[in-house]
Image (tube, rainbow, N blue to C red):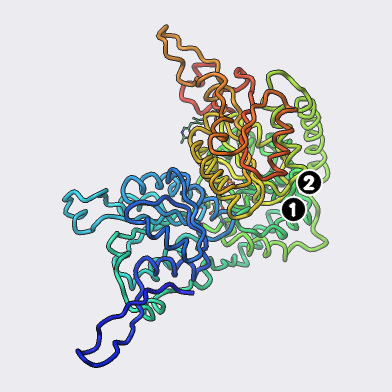
Amino acid sequence: MSAVLKTSLATTSAGAGVAPIQELTDGFHLVIDALKLNDIDTIFGLPGIPVTDLCRMAQAEGMRVISFRHEQHAGNAAAAAGFLTQKPGICLTVSAPGFLNGLTALANATTNCFPMILISGSSEREIVDLQQGDYEEMDQLAIAKPLCKAAFRVLHAEDIGVGVARAIRAALSGRPGGVYLDLPAKLFAQTMDAAAGKKSLIKVVDPAPRQIPAPDAVKRALDLLKSAKRPVILLGKGAAYAQADADIRALVERTGIPYLPMSMAKGLLPDTHLQSAAAARSYVLAEADVVLLVGARLNWLLSHGKGKTWGTDKGSKQFIQIDISPTEIDSNVAIAAPLIGDIGSCVAALLAGIDANWPKAPADWTGAIAERKDKNLSKMAVTLAARPSPMSFQSALSVIRDQVKARPDAIIVNEGANTLDFARSIVDMYEPRKRLDVGTWGIMGIGMGFAVAAAVVTGKPVIAVEGDSAFGFSGMEVETICRYELPICVVVFNNNGVYRGTDINPSGTKDVAPTVFVKNARYDKLMEAFGGVGVHATTTDELQKALSEAVASGRPTLINAMIDEGAGTESGRIGNLNPQSAVKK
Ligand code: ADP
Ligand code: TPW
């Protein structure tokens, strides 16, 4: 039902009897109606001038409005919702400072190819453009532009439908990403005839059109794949986003090719799948002769596709790359067989050329991988079974690993350095799109925003596995979690600092070292402050009990898991990127 203001207007000449009722609508309602018309039912945001009433009215009109304590987390929630649902997540903020707080999330969403729309109220254009000092004055459109896929401003109520439609299309079509929509305060109060307003709205048809790959490109890819002696399929978060789960699994299984999931592609096939080569990753990357990339970029996370990691110092490697963005191809190394299109269509096209006679991946290759895998998994099993005191990252994560095995529908949110790196390899995922993490930038602060979004859009239990530093970036949102009674269990891996808690200030002044926090902090009390469950866990038994109770009950819970403060390594597994790492060694 569209929202209208029923206003009696004196549109008749004096004395002409009963005045006809003209139904009016306004900018507020047109924005809400435009979103709802496009099946967008949730707004993540933070109220204030000029969007407070927009939040209220959206709720009154049946939308879910999730109000945060800081816009960055509302923005992160919108981004995660976009990734999980293939609908742009909406983040709503006030002008200048609220907008800027949301901007990090918008830029991060764009970097990660997650569809979201940041909608910010803004000040009077006339005053902003003459720089006359309006309340929260800022040229927001200009600032947003370089940080997102597209940026639009709507000045007239009758253009709201077009503005929202363009924003949705820009966010979803081609490579997904962040879009900024600037709505000046004056727009919201503008009125227009309700029927004309309704007509002005656009329901976007086919916002992410399929892009069918060219037949010759498909043939080139198949020929190369067939010729491979040591092939590997590398699945990225683009493959998870694409929701072509059954075909991706069929591609892996029909060809018998070993596969490696990037962190957010874990669970596309269960990590326990026989063809998963994750436990032999270094061997496979270095030795493979043909690599099929499915929605994964050859960026820093994949050592740019060259060097020692890839064994390209010893010999050449050939790449097939499926991506929706043609300009991604050759961005780091030569791609022998680019396959441009949406992943669903590209994988389906490959499958059409892979019949029962397709030669399975050579047994000497898969056998060599299995051998290394078994060895590494047995080694890991010993580490996971150990019960040191205080807990190690591995012993605490073994508890989370068991919990996810018992509840494979639970969503894991993961950030930190060591906490991230260890969790990625220890915690097996069984279902697609159940793992959300720091993504392409390795950004800290996504934790509570992603967790809230995951709980809100899926209704499933969420376990946020957080380094203590990482948690601090969004920790105040535990109030949001309690307020909306979300089924989120936050596990803080508390090792008293950034990476670890043992650094010493060498200068002799009383300040602690820059990486050290208050020792033995009680993060659990933070959750208790808002009515949630707080647990201080010093053993794996305590952690296990609290975690399984939290997941079973769905009550907001924070477990302060005390980890050996000396256990972490600097920057986790990417210490080599520290400018002075060579000197330190
Ligand atoms: P990861 O970090 O997991 O390696 P990236 O974010 O680097 O993954 O890569 C994701 C890639 O997937 C991007 O290059 C993006 O263009 C691509 N992509 C996203 N959605 C689709 C889709 N539906 N079809 C094809 N490619 C897609
Ligand atoms: C927005 C730099 C990378 S990892 C990290 C920081 C500050 C925290 C590591 O400590 P934590 O984890 O969370 O306690 P652990 O398991 O090692 O003990 N600011 C932003 N993003 C990044 N990546 C940083 C700073 C960083």
What SS does tag 1 mark?
helix
Asked which quadrant contains residue 569, the reply is: top right
In this rendering, the answer to whether 485 lies above or below 492 is below
Instruction: Read off the residue under disc 2.
Output: 273
Which label sits on residue 277? Answer: none
The kind of residue tagged 2 is His
x, y percent for residue 147: 39, 49
In this rendering, the answer to whether 268 lies above or below 438 is below
Q: Is mark 1 within 8 Å of ligand 1?
A: no
Q: Tell which of 171 and 547 is nearer to you.
A: 547
Q: Residue at x 63, y 40 (%)?
A: 489
The kind of residue tagged 1 is Val
Q: Is residue 261 left or right of residue 363?
A: left
Counting other residues with Cα less than 10 Å from the Cα at mark 2, is it few (<14), some (14-19), or many (20 or more)? Answer: few
x, y percent for residue 577: 51, 28
Marks 2 and 1, how far apart in space? 10 Å
Q: Residue at x 39, y 68 (%)?
A: 29
Counting other residues with Cα less than 10 Å from the Cα at mark 1, is it few (<14), some (14-19), or many (20 or more)? Answer: some
Asked which quadrant contains residue 55, the reply is: bottom left
x, y percent for residue 475: 51, 36
Q: Tell which of 315 and 188 is nearer to you.
A: 188
Q: Are marks 2 and 1 in contact (CB under 8 Å)?
A: yes
Q: Tell which of 513 and 185 is nearer to you.
A: 185
In this rendering, the answer to whether 540 lies above or below 266 is above
Q: Earlier in the sequence, mark 2 or mark 1?
A: 1
Q: Quadrant of the C terminus?
A: top right
Q: Residue at x 73, y 32 (%)?
A: 544
Q: Please say whether residue 326 is visible from this viewpoint.
A: no
Instruction: Read off the residue under disc 1.
Output: 252
Q: Is residue 508 left or right of residue 400?
A: left
